Image: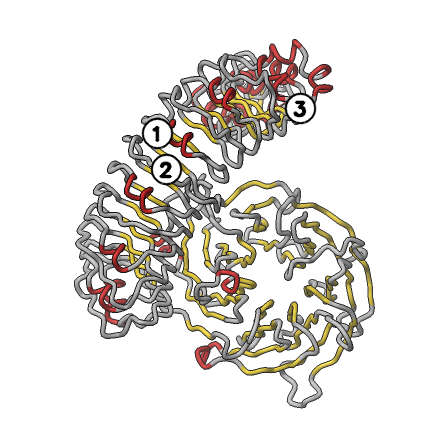
Amino acid sequence: MRAGRRHKMKHGGVAEEGAVPLLVVVLAGNPVTAAAVLACMNTADTHALRRLHPAVADGVAAVPWADTDTTVRDAVRWRAALPAAVGAQLPAYTGRWYRYTWGGAAIAALAGVTHLTIEGCSTFATLLPHLPPSLTSLVVQYIKKSPTLSFAHLHALTTLDCSQNDAVTGRVVRSLPPSLRELRIQFCNVAASADFRHLRALQRLFCAGTDVSPAVVASLPPSLELIDYGGSWANWPSGVSLAHLTCLHVIRAAGTGVTTAALVSLPVTLAELDLTESVLRGPFNHLQGLRTLTVTHTSGFTDALLASLQPSLVSLDASRCFDLTEEAVLPHLPALQTLIVSHTRIGDALLASAPPSLVTLHVEECSNVTHRVSMDHLCALRVLLSGGTDVPSGVLAACRARGGIAPVGCARSYAHNHTSRVNALVALADGRVVSGGDDATVQLWDLEAFDRGATVAVRTAGPVSALAVFPDGRRVAIGVTGTSGKNRGGVIVWDSGAATSCNRTTIYRGSVQSVAMLPNGALAVGRSDGAVHVLDADTGAVMATLAERHTSQNLWHGRALAVWPCSGWLAVGVQCGDARVWEVGARVAQVATLTTEWGETVQLADGRVASGDRHRVQIFDAATGTCIQVLGGLTASVIALAALPDGRLAGGSVHGTVWVWDTRLAGSHTPRVKLGCVHGGSNWASSQITALLPLPGGRLVSAAASGSVELWHVPSPSQALQLCDEAPEPEV
């Protein structure tokens, strides 16, 4: 549509001169709809929108944009185009850029801004005095020390994020305005003598990764409601007391060693406490208002500490607490609704002591629980995850009869077959599953007798790094990594249907890290040295080269080659780098690049592409490589992905958790369900999920670094919505 061109509708639906097109009316011509529609966009879209129609340009100019994700390269032009904007992100800033880009006119353009994000700013002290006093939110990181650094003139500031810098001196802290309500000083060097007492309105403090002295803690104002000290893997400050923080409701202190004195000093107002992967040395009996306690993988959480919990508790996550014993029992907890005790040594006694109020119970991989356990009193139970635990079938049936979710326990095979890391999974046309791993074997699984284990089909000279099935559904390409000596690695083609012993042939030599079968019948091979070749699948002849050998010997992710079914393109990804997308057919050409952390991708049923990226999953537009959605809120990186046949997405984390997202549902929150954790005991490194394989009938196969291969029964979409994890993950 050309700007300025106008139409109107004749009788019968024919356009006439004079009417505003319907799209323009929806976007900006109607004051009722304009604000709602434009609020779903960001300022990166406004250039095209303003050219659409003069009415749209007027509507865009009137929106109070608070976009702090799109970088403003020219503040003067930005203000002229968006006069009502109140939020912006400034680019990386140096003295030279200040003189030529952030002069007087550019500084004046920031007048009235309330939300500001500044990328790595090496000379922030020069710009700070010129920031408008209207600011209520400021994000600026990597600040260098400066004797002139002062925030005192920002009288309206309520949120400040100055994480990852060494400039938090006592003088800087004194300059912070008393209006602050949220302060983030994560991974900073905070002066041991810094005094925060003047911040009498401060409610939320995030200081993960920061060494906080006892003097600093003592100076914290009593207005504080949340302290996030977690994820830092640092020790809790010795001799610290929090008794003076009488309004404190939430403490997140994952990865810290909490002393007895510190626990005893916690205020009675505390409602949420996260001590994941900590060391406990004290009781909880004085926390009479505690509602949520997370002690996952925490040392020292014994039967005695469990018994000290107060009746106010609503949610307890004590998974992987290996100090709990078979004799552990719950105290009187009449309000308890969520209990997670998976991967522990608890027995029948604890489940028998669970209160009737319990709604959600995770009791996976608890080998001391027997089928004789008494659970009939749990009449409110609606979510029961019990894979690997001998829970009576009647309890599962009763939960389902109430409309609850009780998935069938997962059939598992541990080290009975693969003796080390499993790297790849594929399915044959006859329904059998093939796995390959570092133990130099390719094994065959019959899903109808999955619990009986697998049979070894092929033994190789080196670790099996990857598998790919030929279009006939019978032959399998086996990628072998070269190690040393006679083992150079290569690609072996194995015919799973051949009756003779001569059912394999080597078509390629070299250390292979990944393989993928292309739609045209060719075979893509990713070498360990970074080269990517396209082979004739029958002869092994190199038909094309997509990437040459990498001189720095960049390591490839184990499954970094992926074919996108909807487009027939090949995604080539490098660990800790971009994923590059190639068209390999009549022509060979790179068509897109995805900026992602791990490089592994899968294509969803609707054509979009998913990629794991450190505590989140990114969804991309396949044609443009643009990230259009982020699935966040995870506490561990997702490194294995699988597109389910019904359009959902499955992911496996480095901590052994299997998730399912319903990416078909639009909205700011994408429903997700946790299927459970793979077998791995106390060693999370061995629990790392290395491969996922979706199968018909709502089944999913996973492989782990421990050598286990597990069969999951995925809840239907309607069941998954009831299991959906709606609560946000702790901020780290």
At mark 1, the secondary structure is loop
Residue labelled with disc 2: 240
Q: Please tell me whether mark 2 or mark 3 is closer to you in this view.
A: 2
Please tell me whether residue 433 is drawn above or below residue 562 in the rendered image: below
- Residue 233 pos. (x, y %): 48, 47
Residue 324: x %, y % from top left: 31, 62
The residue beneath circle 3 is 93
Where residue 638 sits: x, y (%)? Answer: 53, 53
Instruction: Classify 10 Å Cα crowding around label 2: few (below 14), some (14-19), many (20 and above).
Output: many
Residue sticking out furthest to the front: 239
Q: Is residue 264 visible?
A: yes
Quarter location, residue 79: top right
Residue occupying image coordinates x 32% and y 26% = 223
Q: Which mark is residue 224?
A: 1
| Position of residue 500 in the picture relative to residue 714 (left or right) | right
Label 3 is placed on what type of residue?
Tyr
Q: Label 1 is placed on what type of residue?
A: Leu
- The reply to whether dot 2 and dot 3 touch (C-beta < 8 Å) is no
341, 430: nearer the viewer: 341
Q: Secondary structure at mark 2?
A: loop
**For the residues bearing labels 3 and 1, Cβ distance under 8 angstroms:** no
- Specify few, some or many for label 3: CA neighbours under 10 Å numbering under 14, 14-19, or 20 or more: some
Q: CA distance from mark 3 to mark 1?
A: 33 Å
Q: Is residue 222 left or right of residue 680?
A: left
Within the image, what quadrant is residue 56 found in? Answer: top right
Q: Secondary structure at mark 3?
A: loop
N-term-proximal mark, 3 vs 1:
3
- Judge by depth and name the residue closer to the eye, 234 or 633: 234
Is label 1 in contact with label 2 (beta carbons under 8 Å)? no
